[in-house]
Image: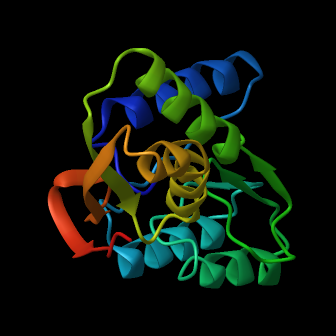
Amino acid sequence: MDSLKVERWQTDLDKFQRRAAELGAQVLVETAEGDDELQLQQARKLLASGVKALVLVPHDADKAVRIVSAAKASHVPLLCYERLVRDPDVTFFIGVDASVVGHLQAIFSHAAGAQRKLRADRGSSADGNAKILHDAQMRVLQPLVDRGNIKIVSDTWTKDWDRRRPTRTCPRP
């Protein structure tokens, strides 16, 4: 796991563990708390312990390619959960269509009477889903910006999806 600081990940993990237990599987959990090197060490430790499969929620999808390589070298199937590591050796991916999610977020926020001034928190630059979400949101919002219906006052990448920790402001047209 990348982190369990956000309630969503704890909920997902709890459900995963319950279902795995129903199926007779034992689940070993490691949490890297956003540390890519620690996540790699933890994956190597699990692989060395003889796990039959590795489920990965990568912190940084680009850096996690090393984990995919380690799993392949150990002949262990690797499932990416929610954050895809773009590597041909990923055995399976399960997640949502981030483009559809971003599209719906923008439609519903505007339909719900969102403020005339919006702040676009892009999410973590280490998560490929963040760019997909943002691009889909902007396909809906940009025409509204162009017509002057709304104004985006801030467009910022954040560290680990925490909007209180901006990492880079993105220029707006």
Depicted 51 relative to depicted 81: above or below: below
Front one among 157 and 150: 150
Q: Residue 4: which quarter of the image?
A: top left
Residue 96 shows in the view: no
Residue 124 x/y as whole percent: 38, 63
Depicted 119 relative to depicted 104: above or below: below
What color scheme is it? rainbow
Depicted 166 relative to depicted 8: above or below: below
Residue appearing at x 38%, y 71% in the figure:
173
Residue 57 x/y as whole percent: 55, 55
- Horizontal side of residue 17 vs 164, given as left or right: right
Tally the numbered discs: 0
Residue appearing at x 65%, y 81% in the figure:
65
The residue most toward the front is 147
Front one among 87 and 37: 87
Q: Residue 97: which quarter of the image?
A: top right
Residue appearing at x 40%, y 31% in the figure:
8
Residue 143 x/y as whole percent: 55, 47
Residue 64 shows in the view: yes
Front one among 7 and 66: 7
Residue 36 x/y as whole percent: 40, 76
- Horizontal side of residue 115 vs 140, given as left or right: left
Q: Residue 101: which quarter of the image?
A: top right
Front one among 13 and 155: 155
Residue appearing at x 19%, y 65% in the figure:
166
